[in-house]
Amino acid sequence: MEDKPQDKSIACIECGGQMETGYVPDHSYGQWVHPSWVAGKPERHWIAGMKIKAPHRYPLTSWRCEDCGLLKFYAHRKHWNKVTD
């Protein structure tokens, strides 16, 4: 079984402090959703605010340094279903 980044103890690259796993929730259409990474540049959409043309979204895991507050994000290799416009 492959180790996942969120399963490992990570030291902060700035100060050497301990990083804790967490997440940055995204508020969308009256609900909280898990954030994702999408390749390319964002395009504005007059109704939705942002038009997404990328075929895949990659879920993010994040860490925060307990000492200096640095945030680090990791986009998982396995993507979610295709995103529609």
Image (spheres, rainbow, N blue to C red):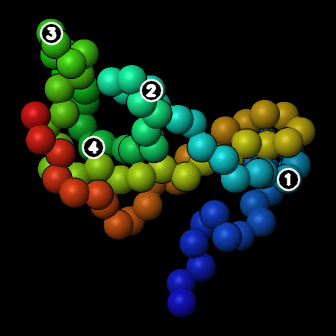
Picture quarter with the C terminus: top left
Q: Give the residue at the far left of this rendering.
A: 85
Give the mark, 1 or 3, whose residue is nearer the N terminus: 1
Task: Give the residue type that dot 2 points to.
Answer: His
Q: Quadrant of residue 27?
A: top left
Q: Which mark is residue 18?
A: 1
Give the residue number, with chain letter if any, for mark 4: 39
**Residue 39 falls left or right of residue 36:** left
Residue density around tag 1, few if under 14, some if 14–19, many if 20 or more, within 10 Å: some
Residue carrying label 3:
46
Residue extending farthest bottom: 1
Residue 10 point in image, percent of width and height: 75, 60
Q: Residues within 10 Å of mark 4 (few under 14, many from 20)?
A: few
Q: Residues within 10 Å of mark 2 (few under 14, many from 20)?
A: few
Residue at the (12%, 41%) spot, across then down? 84
Residue 24: x and y in percent read 57, 36
SS at circle 3: loop
Q: The residue tagged with tag 4: helix, strand or loop?
A: loop
Is the Cβ of the residue at disc 3 closer than 8 Å to that at disc 2? no
Q: Please tell me whether mark 2 sits on a helix, a strand or a loop.
A: strand
In space, the residues marked 1 and 2 are separated at their CA atoms by 28 Å
Mark 2 or mark 1, which is nearer the start of the sequence?
Answer: 1
Q: Is residue 33 left or right of residue 83?
A: right
Residue that carries the numbered disc 2 in the rendered image = 27
- Left/right of residue 43 with respect to residue 4 in the rendered view: left
Q: What kind of residue is marked 3? A: Trp
Distance from Cα at disc 1 to Cα at disc 3:
42 Å
Q: Sequence-wise, which precedes: disc 4 or disc 2? A: 2
- CA gap, disc 3 to disc 2? 18 Å
Residue closer to the observer: 56 or 30: 30
The CA span between labels 4 and 2 is 20 Å
In the picture, residue 45 is in which quadrant? top left
